[in-house]
Amino acid sequence: MQSLRKREIKFLKGIGPKRAELLEKEFGIKSYYDLIHHFPHSYLDRSSIYKISQLYGEMPSIQLKGRFLTFNTVGEGAKTRLVGLFSDGTATIEIVWFRRIKSIKEAYIIGQEYILFGKPEMFNNRWSMVHPEIDSSESVGAMQGLRGVYPLTEKLRSSGFSSRTLHTYIQAALASIKYVADPLPAEVREKFRLMPLLDAMRIIHNPTDNNALQQARYRLKFDELFFLQLNIQRYSSKRNEKLQGFHFPRIGRFFNQFYTECLPFELTDAQKRVIKEIRADMGTGRQMNRLLQGDVGSGKTLVALLTMLIALDNGTQACLMAPTEILATQHYETISRMVAPIGINVKLLTGSTRKKERDIIHQQLMDGSLHILIGTHAVIEDNVQFKNLGYVVIDEQHRFGVMQRGRLWRKNTVPPHVLVMTATPIPRTLAMTVYGDLQVSVIDQLPPGRKPITTLLRYDNARFEVYKAIGRQLKEGRQVYIVYPLIKENEKLDLKCLEEGYQNIKDNFPSYKVAYVHGRMKPAEKDWQMQLFASGEAQIMVATTVIEVGVNVPNATVMVIENAERFGLSQLHQLRGRVGRGGDRSYCILMSKPQIAAETRKRLQLMTTTTDGFLIAEADLKMRGPGDLEGTMQSGIALDLRIANLATDGNIVQLAHNAVEELLDDDPTLSAPNHAKLIEELNIRFNKQIDLSRIS
């Protein structure tokens, strides 16, 4: 495989320096390895040849066999096109080209037999085919059966590339390869019944039948996911072996007194289970790195507090970092109020903290009298020093860069235990891939008394009824969020905008105060507007998605999302989580244009049938792909998958995960002689990545 990476495609017949430069720019294809790993995104069946007289209705891409009768150049200037009249003896069809007209006229001869492959369409009551692939009937044998369709960019198309062109180059590269050293150990290949690697590489581009194609795809997907898992798990294993942490054996006064005297409500079984998991980690003597997932309102903050109290009981300090000042303030107010009766010193540190208060915080951190520090990015500044930081909680962890998180846990010679929390449910396959063997805890229950949110899909023509419903809630003393996709009007996008919406809401609800928040506001102005709503002085909050994670307003019972069709499912779920935080029945109203695609309508209707964040996250992954879910590009793990799909290949993810676990159990350092090729391939694939596994 190493030799394939060294062989440049510019020396491959037919490519040359200019085309090689274009392929590298458009797809990063520089070597034979890159070219062979540019896989088809779909396949077409070229086993049949149609008669022109058989064409009817909406046709897929098909093959026709016949001869050109005439060629005519039609139109002038930019509208010039070449039209060839093609016949197979049963009828005729017009073949049309808009580019490379001169070279095409020179390439094809009237009266000679050709096979055309393309999509026939009816135009002006005549069948036509635009820019088909054309082969002489003698050379077409190799193109029968399943034929790969390769990804292309518009720039490649306009430069004369076609799917067939790429296929030809790939065939030339494959023809030059006689042997490939398989990096997967024989025991892995045998146990998981994997096709030989070179066979898979050939069949993926030239499938003899569907069964062989599926075996080839399985082998190549397994390889991708196996090496991704191995890269994560080898570092995680190394961390677990070598990175010693605090040993917290005690449950003491702080925890017990809070649990018996201050606990605001009975813990759910899920919360109890998660606390046990975290406590077990704290007792191992190794640094804990645990991800805590739970829907909005599931009680993650209370779990974080109880586990921070364990750290305090063992003589260390704790810190909680949140992404925004308003969220940090919210945590501070909640936690300081809850622990006040048991004498715990809690302080808030943000960009707005005055110097006098900062000086007090710095002094108390150093002398150990400050037990829990809550704050924003301000807590990672170099001058913020702890006497003995033993436990770190990071809320909405994907909002922070991995290096920022690392600066926080490096504030002690013994690395503190780390709990990262997210209210964005992560699909199991994605979590397994992104976080490797990082321990994951899930709170999958809501506290008692929380009423499910009713979600409704309404179209723009029902706006009057929606406003009447909002009015009824406002009259009952409730509050309302209205979210817009844009701040200002955009002529290119037919979407509602906040500026227009703010005035419209004021006009329709003149008796109520309206606050507004968007991402371009200065932090102080944004916080002031949020505070107007949080205090109840403003009854309506008009906002963009900046309130997706933010202020807790138990009195807010309605969330209206304009142009809901423009949002992903997970984002809609996050926005919905802003309401239903009190004891009152709450509503989320998804406003949409009536004319939307069937897939979009299905997505929005799913939101009305479930409030289960994990079901929604799985559906979002299947519909949209992994993308940048949960800020994975900040985790140090690039999900640059060429053939595997986390949305549909969950079973292969699991198999690869299991295979890596077994391999590392037998050979944790991968030092066995038969793993030399494995290590070489792993290092090549991930040589650009930093070892970030020590940072959760």
Image (cartoon, rainbow, N blue to C red):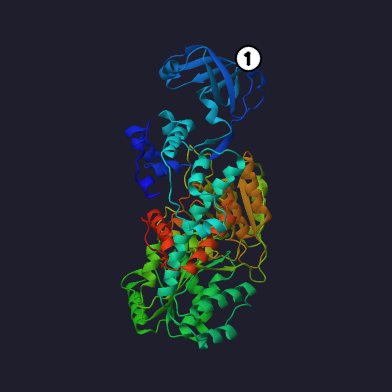
- The residue labelled by disc 1 is 91
**Residue 447 falls left or right of residue 431:** right
Q: Nearer the viewer, residue 159 or 618?
A: 159
Q: How many marks?
A: 1
Name above or below for residue 470 compared with residue 422.
above
In which quarter of the view is residue 193 placed? Answer: bottom right
Measured as percent of width and height from the top left, residue 375 is found at 42, 70
Dot 1: within a 10 Å radius of its alpha carbon, few (fewer than 14), some, or many (20 or more) residues?
few
Q: Quadrant of the C terminus?
A: bottom left
Q: Nearer the viewer, residue 481 or 515?
A: 481
Measured as percent of width and height from the top left, residue 233 is found at 47, 64
The residue positioned 63% from the left and 23% from the top of the image is 50
Name above or below for residue 66 compared with residue 327.
above
What's the residue type where badge 1 is placed?
Ala
The residue positioned 49% from the left and 44% from the top of the image is 201
**Residue 238 falls left or right of residue 300:** left
Measured as percent of width and height from the top left, residue 106 is found at 42, 16
Q: Nearer the viewer, residue 167 or 522?
A: 167
Measured as percent of width and height from the top left, residue 343 is found at 48, 86
Secondary structure beneath dot 1 equals loop
